[in-house]
């Protein structure tokens, strides 16, 4: 899997910021739009750096349990919050790329106030 398949796009980052999510607090990488910079890397350049979130960054932010009974399930094909026993599901997304499933899950959690801003 290439790095671009493991990080949110700048457009997605800007959408999270519009929702009031502190991307800087949760990002492990920076990008100038062309180059990925790990926080410890030295960078010289005139272009501004944008915070970038990886698959791991997003998973570490998502709540594992919602409402004491809905559990997060993530795999390469989908993300869902559903009950362990029973068929009740309160959120489901299925996209081609894992990063897009995680992004949609994060946005849903923010909009439904399952993540404190």
Image (tube, rainbow, N blue to C red):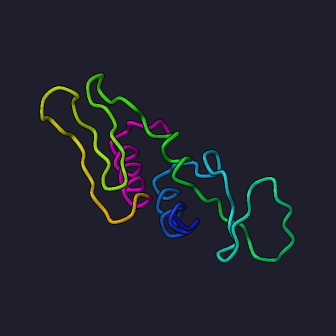
Q: In the rendered image of this protein, does residue 9 appear above or below residue 57?
A: below
Residue 9: x and y in percent read 52, 68
Is 105 positioned to the left or the right of 19 in the image? left
Residue at 24 percent of width and 49 percent of height: 92
What is the residue that sits farthest to the left in this orientation? Answer: 87
Residue 84: x and y in percent read 23, 28
Residue 113 is covered by the magenta coloring: yes
Front residue of 5/15: it is: 5
| Region of the chain picked out in magenta, as a range | 99-117
Residue at 55 percent of width and 69 percent of height: 4
Q: In the rendered image of this protein, does residue 75 appear above or below residue 73?
A: below
Is 100 positioned to the left or the right of 7 in the image? left
Residue at 74 percent of width and 58 percent of height: 38
Q: In the rendered image of this protein, does residue 24 appear above or below residue 97?
A: above
Front residue of 26/18: it is: 26
How many callouts does the rendering have? 0
Is 90 positioned to the left or the right of 26 in the image? left
Residue at 24 percent of width and 45 percent of height: 91
Q: Residue 76 sits in which quadrant?
A: bottom left
Residue 28 is covered by the magenta coloring: no
Q: Residue 72 sits in which quadrant?
A: top left
Residue 23: x and y in percent read 58, 52
User: Main SS of the magenta segment?
Assistant: helix
Is 39 positioned to the left or the right of 9 in the image? right
Q: Residue 110 sits in which quadrant?
A: top left
What is the residue that sits farthest to the top in this orientation? Answer: 68
Residue 46: x and y in percent read 82, 77
């Amino acid at each position: 899997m290439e790095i671009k398949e493991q990080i949110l796009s700048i457009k997605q980052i800007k959408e999270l910021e519009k929702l009031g999510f502190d991307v800087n607090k949760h990002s492990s990488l920076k990008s100038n739009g062309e180059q990925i910079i790990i926080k410890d890397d030295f960078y010289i350049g005139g272009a501004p750096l944008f915070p970038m979130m990886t698959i791991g960054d997003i998973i570490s932010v998502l709540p594992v349990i919602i409402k004491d009974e809905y559990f997060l399930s993530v795999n390469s094909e989908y993300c869902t919050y559903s009950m362990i026993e029973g068929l009740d599901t309160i959120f489901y997304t299925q996209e081609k790329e894992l990063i897009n499933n995680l992004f949609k899950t994060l946005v849903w959690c923010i909009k439904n106030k399952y993540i404190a801003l």
